[in-house]
């Protein structure tokens, strides 16, 4: 298991997350947007189940279900499952109001 890239999420406070992500082989950032669909009574910021959409290679749109769960104060586990059943896993930490981490498949 090797790291594919990194990401940073911002909680917009209305059930939406906005993000930028970077693949280790890319030379540019890409956007990601998420809307909360589960765990609407979140006990902890960022935690929940989201519909997530991101752009790859400047033209490809990918949709997934993103699940974010807190394991310890300030530490989160993320799992993206795309519509074609591809899984990505990530681990992140909070830094101020941001969730910053890395991901792999």
Image (spheres, grey):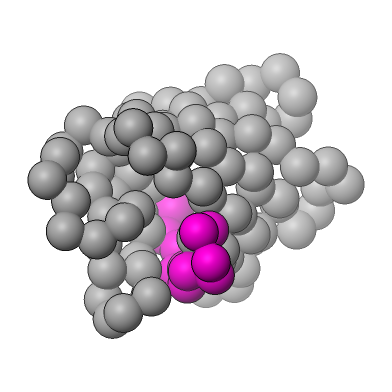
**Is residue 6 placed above or below 80 in the rendered structure?**
below
Figure check: 71 above or below 32: below
Q: Main secondary structure of the magenta part?
A: strand
Q: Is residue 92 magenta?
A: yes
Q: Residue at x 63, y 28 (%)?
A: 55
Residue 92 lies, in percent from the top left, at 47, 68
Is 78 placed above or below 76 here?
above
Residue that extends furthest to the right in the rendered view of this protein: 27
The residue nearer to you, when weighing 104 against 7, is 7
Residue 59 visible in the picture: yes
- Residue 56 percent location from the top left of the image: 66, 31
- Image point (51%, 47%), residue name: 10
| Magenta stretch, residue numbers | 86-98
Total marks shown come to 0
The foreground one among 97 and 80 is 97
Can residue 103 be seen by looking at this rendering?
no
Q: Nearer the viewer, residue 8 or 60?
A: 8
Residue drawn at 45 percent across, 38 percent down: 12
In the figure, is residue 61 to the left or right of 42?
Answer: right
Location of residue 4 by image quarter? bottom right
**Residue 56 highlighted magenta (yes or no):** no
- Residue 30 image position (x, y, % from top left): 70, 36
Instruction: Farthest residue to the bottom: give it.
Output: 72
Q: Quadrant of residue 43?
A: bottom left
User: Residue drawn 74% across and 30% down?
Assistant: 57
Q: Is residue 67 left or right of residue 90?
A: left
Q: Where residue 32 sits in the image (x, y, percent)? A: 56, 35
């Amino acid at each position: 298991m090797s790291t594919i890239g990194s990401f940073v999420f911002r909680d917009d406070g209305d059930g939406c997350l906005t993000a930028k992500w970077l693949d280790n082989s890319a030379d540019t950032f890409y956007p990601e947007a998420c809307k909360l669909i589960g765990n609407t009574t979140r006990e902890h910021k960022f935690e929940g189940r989201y519909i997530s959409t991101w752009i790859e290679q400047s033209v490809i749109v990918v949709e997934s279900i993103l699940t974010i769960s807190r394991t310890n104060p300030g530490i989160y586990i993320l799992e993206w499952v795309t519509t074609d059943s591809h899984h990505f896993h990530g681990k992140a930490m909070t830094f101020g109001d941001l969730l910053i981490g890395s991901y792999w498949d």
